[in-house]
């Protein structure tokens, strides 16, 4: 079956990753999806509320404002930024870009991706703040 | 026995690139889109920091229940769900919880179900 190599190697203890900073950061990166899943479930609930009607939609906004939900979603925001920081540095390694025989420095592709994050945020600002009022 | 093992390996080579591809695409969406989505929808909106009409019931409905809304949900809900499913599956393996064959079905199955639900809601709202 998948990952059958574990059957041949001596099994690792569950806390193997606590023994080194590198592995702790690896596990933290894996854990970024936990608050992401929380936000996604909130978002799905919001979509259902929107389908149900105006009262449900207002109720959902109030639910999103409750302290624990807000706190977990702030955690999701932090997790998305941490994930971005770890994910963007992989891009130049997986897909090095060469222009006219010169490879683009890693910092340029990483900065380009952060620029993408900013552009998306500006789009939201334009859609919801500038033209939404 | 050997034949069976060969079959399994053949199947693995067939589906694993799909999960890694979805993981990668979902990772891009998570990194580039989700910071802004979470900031505006899950932080600024409930705190009342957006203009009152920005995501009123009428405006939110017309934004979500549309063709761009369908694509938005695909990029903001479905793709990141497969990214999360992949990380959860491998994370569970790393801390020796459950068995991988079952976790795989549960995680990717769950991501598929929620994705179909999310896109179905958009279609239902669009046809209303």
Image (tube, coloured by chain):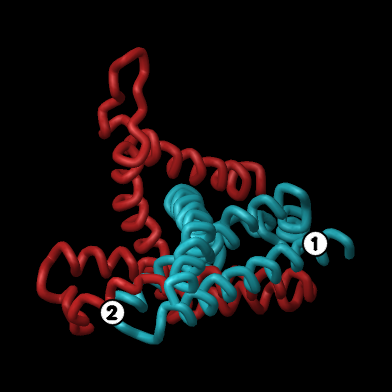
Chain colours: A red, B cyan
Q: Position of residue B8 (x, y in %)?
A: 48, 69
In the image, which disc is placed on residue B103?
A: none
Helix, strand or loop at mark 2 = helix
Residue A127 position, x and y percent, is 62, 45
Query: Label 1 vs label 2: CA separation?
Result: 46 Å
Rendered residue at 46%/48% (across/down): B32
Front residue of B47 and B13: B13
Q: Which residue is mark 2?
A: A7
* Residue that extends furthest to the bottom in the rendered view of this protein: B98
Are labels 1 and 2 on one chain? no
Q: Residue at x 58, y 75 (%)?
A: B110
Give the image location of residue B23, x and y in percent.
47, 57
Q: Is residue B60 left or right of residue A129?
A: right
Tell me which chain the residue with mark 1 is part of.
B
Say which quarter of the image contains residue B60.
bottom right
- Crowding at dot 1, Cα within 10 Å, few <14 / some 14-19 / many 20+, comes out as some
Which residue is under mark 1?
Answer: B123
């Amino acid at each position: 079956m998948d990952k059958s190599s574990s059957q041949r190697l001596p099994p690792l203890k569950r806390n193997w990753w606590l023994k080194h900073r590198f592995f702790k950061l690896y596990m933290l990166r894996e854990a970024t999806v936990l608050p992401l899943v929380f936000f996604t479930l909130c978002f799905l609930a919001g979509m259902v509320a929107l389908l149900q009607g105006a009262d449900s939609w207002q109720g959902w906004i109030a639910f999103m404002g409750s302290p624990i939900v807000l706190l977990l979603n702030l955690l999701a925001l932090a997790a998305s930024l941490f994930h971005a920081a770890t994910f963007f540095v992989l891009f130049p390694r997986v897909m090095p870009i060469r222009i006219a025989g010169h490879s683009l420095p890693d910092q340029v592709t990483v900065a380009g991706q952060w620029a993408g994050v900013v552009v998306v945020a500006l789009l939201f600002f334009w859609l919801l703040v500038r033209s939404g009022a | 026995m050997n034949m069976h093992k060969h079959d399994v390996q053949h199947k693995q080579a067939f589906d694993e690139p799909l999960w890694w591809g979805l993981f990668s695409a979902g990772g891009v969406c998570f990194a580039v889109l989700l910071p802004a989505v979470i900031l505006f929808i899950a932080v600024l909106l409930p705190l009342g920091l957006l203009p009152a009409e920005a995501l009123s019931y009428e405006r939110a409905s017309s934004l979500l229940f549309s063709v761009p809304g369908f694509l938005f949900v695909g990029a903001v809900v479905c793709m990141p769900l497969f990214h999360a499913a992949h990380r959860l599956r491998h994370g569970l393996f790393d801390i020796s919880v459950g068995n991988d064959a079952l976790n795989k079905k549960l995680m990717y199955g769950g991501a598929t179900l929620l994705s179909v639900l999310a896109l179905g809601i958009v279609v239902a709202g669009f046809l209303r």
